[in-house]
Structure formats: structure tokens, C-alpha cells
Amino acid sequence: MTPLQRRRSKTATREMKEKRESLTIPVDTFTMNEGVTAQFPKIQSQNSKTMVIQTNDDENDVFSRMSNEEALNIMSRLPIEDIFNSALVPNKWRIIAVEDPACKRRIQRISERGFPASIRGELWTLLIGSTLRQLPRDASYEALKVVPSAFSDQIQRDVTRTFPTNFFFEFPEVRETLYHILNANANYNKDVGYCQGMGLVAALMMFHMPEEDAFWALSRISGATSPFNSMWQCELPGLTKCLSVFDVLLKAEFPDVYSHFEDECVEISSFATPWFLTGFIHNLPLEISIRIWDQYLVEGYTFIYTVALSIFRLCQDQLLKMNFDSLVMFLNMKDHQPVFTEEDLFATINTWKEQIRPIIVKAESEYVHRPRRCTM
């Protein structure tokens, strides 16, 4: 941030505080444990750092007395951490900020470096659109999560295999929470139900937001307007499309690697299926997966193709030297750390993405759907 930007930010913050102090506004105070661990008492006891947050009811907040233009003017000069701090800016104005073109550009630039951990959950919630809750009046999350679904047994089995080496998932109550989120979504999004890989996405949401917010996030990610909706349906039409499009892109951008794969009889599906089903959560270290989702939620599903192609751009020399077994193991990335660093991957992505995006869009537009028999 330049000195001029810092001065503007301080001025905007001071103006907002002055407006608050000039009004008599009822303020509610509550205590909240830092991070999502507040939901789980056992974990909370091991991470007992607490903070007191003051919140104002949206109806009484000073922002409610401003026009959209006035509020956006103040928020344009605030640090992004303050705009998306629920203790400072009411939900109504954070939703407006996410849709504002100037704020969108700021969010995109910051997503390229990774969102600050302190506001990632807030930003993800707003970008996913899970603030728009649409349950029927006769239903509730509390009811949906305990009513058995057609997938309850399968979900229960898969939950125990989700992030098996992650400390967070050593706690039974955390696994139970993941089960509840997935079971509720299977009852709510019946056209999708449940698909292996969905649990990793739900778990990623759990890392960054409270239980019911994670359910709403998953419900939007698996909803009718999301690319993951067709990815997770029984016949996997979205996955079929992604693998076909990626096959075209790989052949066009890396013909030598593509020919080598043909010689070694390596099918794209043998390694790329979990890439597209989980947005790389299954394959890459968690810290890299989180940054991928920062950008995916801003830029859309073409970004997942960009990540996949960037991996090949970084690793093509090594891939050309490998046989079938080594290629499949290497690209599944399960038994070793990636040969590239986090910095190398995102530098490649962000210097190449504008050039590669129109090529990805063209390949997607030329895709011809061929029905696939359900094997689930």
C-alpha cells in the first residue's frame, strides 16, 4: 500500500468512526473464539485465544443512513480487511461491495496473493452467495441434517476417510459435523444427492466458517447454477465435459507430453478426475488448495483448467522422462510433495491466465456432449 493509499484508508476509517460516535446506536456485545474452532469445545480448549467483538444491528447501523454511493465511497478507501469484517461493516453493505466493479477488481488482485485468513470465510460466503438462504418455511438445517438420506450410509463411510492426516479431523465431533453438512445437502439438493469428493469441498468450507454457513456454501456450490452441480450428478456430465475439454487443451498446448501419454497409454481420467471433481483439494497440499479456491470463487471454473495447464507447464520436462507408473503416481500427487513450489505455481498461473483464458473458453464452447452411462 502506498503512503497516499494509507492516508486515504486512515481518513475513511476515521470518518466512519466519527459517524458512528455522532449517533446513539444500541450496541450488542458478544464473546467469540477466534476461528471456526469455536464450534468444537475440545478444540476450543486447545486454542483458547478469545476476542470480544462489537456488532451493530443492520437496521440501526450508521451505514443504514447512507446512500449506496456514500457507503461505497467510504468503503473504497478502507482496507479490504475492514470492508469484509462483519464486526465493522453490516452484511447488506458487504454484499453491495462484492458486486461493485471497483471492489471486484480489488478482490481479484488480492485473490492472486491469497485472501487474508482473517476475512477468508466472510469473503468466500459472499462470493459463493450463500448469504441468500432459500430453505422452505417447513424445513430447517437442524432438521435436514438428522433426517436419513438415500446416501447416509455412504456419507458415514466416506467421512472417516476425509483428510485422514489432518489434526482437525481427529475429533469425532468434527467428523460428525461434516456428516451433518453432507447429509443435509443430500436431503436439500436431491438432484445431486452425494458424490465422493464432495466431502473435501464441504470440509474446506468447514475450515473457514461455522457449520450452518458451511452447509449453505455447499448447497450453493452444488446448486443448479454451479459448475459442480453437473460435476457431481450421477452420470457425471460435468466431469465428462472437463476431461474432454482438458484433453483438447493438453494436446494443443503440450503436444510432446500428449504424444508421450499416448505412447505410455496414460488416460487423462487416470489422474485428472479428482482434479476436476474437487478443485484440486484431493491432490495438492491444503495451503495451495485454499489459494486455488480463493481465485476460483472470483474467476470461475475456467480457472481450474488454468491451474491444470500450469502444472503441466511447470512439469513438462520431468513428465517426458517418466513411464506409465511414474506418470500416474506423479500426477496424482498423493505420495509426495509437488516438485513445484506454491510461489512457482501461482506465478505461472497469474502470468499466463489472461493469455490462456480465451483458448479455454473456445475449447469449452466447442465441446459436444456424449451421454455417459451412470456407474455410481
Image (cartoon, rainbow, N blue to C red):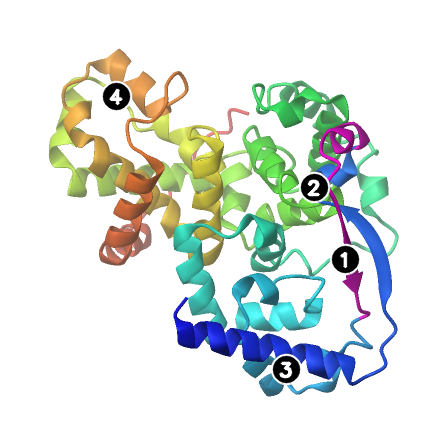
Secondary structure beneath dot 4 equals loop
Say which amino acid is labelled 3: Glu
Residue 179 coordinates in the image, percent (x, y): 72, 29
Q: Quadrant of the N terminus?
A: bottom left
Secondary structure beneath dot 1 equals strand
How far apart marks 2 and 1 lie (CA) works out to 15 Å
Magenta stretch encompasses residue 53: yes
Secondary structure beneath dot 2 equals helix
Residue 260 coordinates in the image, percent (x, y): 14, 24
Magenta residue span: 41-57
Mark 4 vs mark 3: in front: 3
Magenta stretch encompasses residue 48: yes
Which residue bears the numbered disc 3? Answer: 15
Say which amino acid is labelled 1: Ile
Say which amino acid is labelled 4: Val
Q: Does residue 77 appear in this view?
A: no
Which residue bears the numbered disc 4? Answer: 266
Q: Is residue 144 left or right of residue 170?
A: right
How far apart marks 1 and 4 lie (CA) works out to 54 Å
Secondary structure beneath dot 3 equals helix
Residue 117 coordinates in the image, percent (x, y): 56, 48
- For the residue carrying disc 1, how many other residues have a C-alpha within 10 Å: few (<14), some (14-19), or many (20+)? some
Q: Is residue 151 left or right of residue 273?
A: right
- For the residue carrying disc 3, how many other residues have a C-alpha within 10 Å: few (<14), some (14-19), or many (20+)? few
Tell me the residue at 28%/26% (across/down). 339
Say which amino acid is labelled 2: Val
Q: Are marks 1 and 4 in contact (CB under 8 Å)?
A: no
Which residue bears the numbered disc 2? Answer: 36
Figure check: 293 above or below 21: above
Figure check: 179 above or below 12: above
How far apart marks 3 and 1 lie (CA) works out to 20 Å
Q: Which mark is residue 53?
A: 1
